[in-house]
Amino acid sequence: MMALRNSFEQLPSLAQDPNKFHVLASASEYREYLIQAIREAKSRIYLVALYLEDDEAGRAVLSELYNAKQNNPDLDIKVCVDWHRAQRGLIGADQSDGNAVMYREYRQNHQHGVPVFGVPVRGREVFGVLHLKGFVVDDTVIYSGASLNNIYLNYKDRYRFDRYHVLGNPSLADSMVQFINQEMIANPAVNDLSLSEKPTTKQIKSDIRQLRGSLSQAQYQFTPERLNADQVAVTPLVGIGKRRNRLNHAVNQLLARAKNEIFICTPYFNFPKSVAKQIKRALKRGVKVSIVVGDKTANDFYISPEEEFKTIGGLPYMYELNLRRFAKSNEAHIASRRLSIKLWKHDDNSFHLKGIWVDKTNMLITGNNLNPRAWTLDLENALLIRDPHGHLVEKFEQEVANILEHTQLICTYKQFEKVEHYPVPAQKLIRKITRVKADRVLKRLL
């Protein structure tokens, strides 16, 4: 344990002024902050997200970017999205060319273009996507797991609840911009989707393999800073794949060093084996563990029984079955209140929160879903916050209270439905998957 603790404490970090660390409470507050930041930008705007959707909210953001660029052509604006996700429609929707059509349309109708780079983490979307998070506007980092569309930005009546943080930190902003430029945009596999001419995925197949190889070795570059008692430490982490994944390693270390309490948020309950093992060990050594997960009806893949069922609609039920099994095997810990499981549900909104708090001194802000897919396939990042003097405790406690507002405590695994109580199409799908033993393969991809 001593070697583990030393390794964790020796992670290089940047000094963060706690007064320039802010937590936003809602999707609408996040949307308003982002729009205002774009309007006030002086030197640079870098947006990285899984997707920038062709809907009202997506067009509002892209319009703001183009307005800023027309007003100040020297403004350095770059957007990065997943290559595959940008060139298809929504899951279950009709075949289309996706959001790239919008990017080209805006480029053709403006004098000064805003590049939207497609980043192909893998040759096929199912085997890995750009799941990197973080926007940089001038010297400020705006970090959230949210992508850019109507529901993530609460543009209409519904919202997808996430975490939203703002860090005023020039060194952190520079490090993240350097990574985007050098490790992604400079690579020949990455192409501007706003241009009329672009290669096919097949044409850049070898470039994609090279990109994934280089990303597996990449990390954020910065000069470590010494902290004083009035500051907190922030370490940007990035990881992809099974081997030498610094982010995965840091998550396991973070959980392993917990002494009093662990608080975890995840939208899709399907922990990687190493995370499940660390949680089991923590419970055994007397650590209080709290897990907040979305109710199956708050899952972004949930389909109401009144609507036509599609295969993708089986996912929320599979996640709930995972959670039921976990709760059943830990019934004693639930009864002793050592383990707390809380389900989030608010009207017909959805839940997309991720993150870890340990002993109120170490926090992970991330878009990582803490599932096997994030662990092995997708390009992920995070901000590890170490706060030994407790400067951010009040802010994080307010954030936790905000998260817990619409949750229900699970007192026994029996509160979860059995398969036979699911809608018939979901029952048939789950039994078919289990019969052919495809559930083991699926757990690695979900």
Image (tube, rainbow, N blue to C red):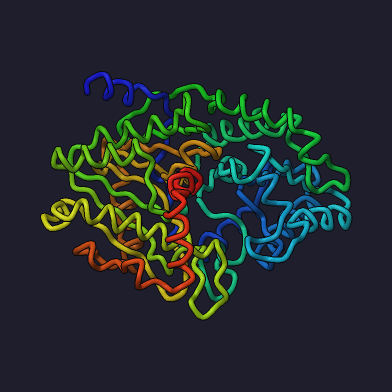
Where's residue 106, x and y in %? 82, 57
Above or below for 45 versus 36? above
- Direction front: furthest residue: 435
Where, quadrant-wise, is the N terminus in this rendering? Answer: top left
Q: How many marks?
A: 0
Left or right, 341 with respect to 17, comes to left
Above or below for 114 versus 53? above
Above or below for 424 versus 361? below
Where's residue 229, x and y in %? 30, 32
Residue at the image position 52 percent from the left and 39 percent from the top: 380
- Direction top: furthest residue: 3
Left or right, 73 with respect to 434, comes to right
Left or right, 60 with respect to 373, comes to right
- Which of the two residues, 226 or 202, is positioned nearer the viewer here? 202
- Which of the two residues, 231 or 58, is positioned nearer the viewer here? 58
Residue at the image position 60 percent from the left and 46 percent from the top: 126
Does any portion of residue 441 appear in the rendered image? yes
Q: Quadrant of residue 278?
A: top left
Where's residue 201, x and y in %? 76, 40
- Direction left: furthest residue: 336
- Which of the two residues, 368 or 13, is positioned nearer the viewer here? 368
- Which of the two residues, 212 or 194, is positioned nearer the viewer here? 212
Q: Quadrant of residue 92?
A: bottom right
Does any portion of residue 167 appear in the rendered image? no
Where's residue 45, x and y in %? 66, 45
Left or right, 339 with respect to 89, comes to left
Residue at the image position 61 percent from the left and 66 percent from the top: 150
Above or below for 167 versus 242? below
Residue at the image position 49 percent from the left and 75 percent from the top: 304
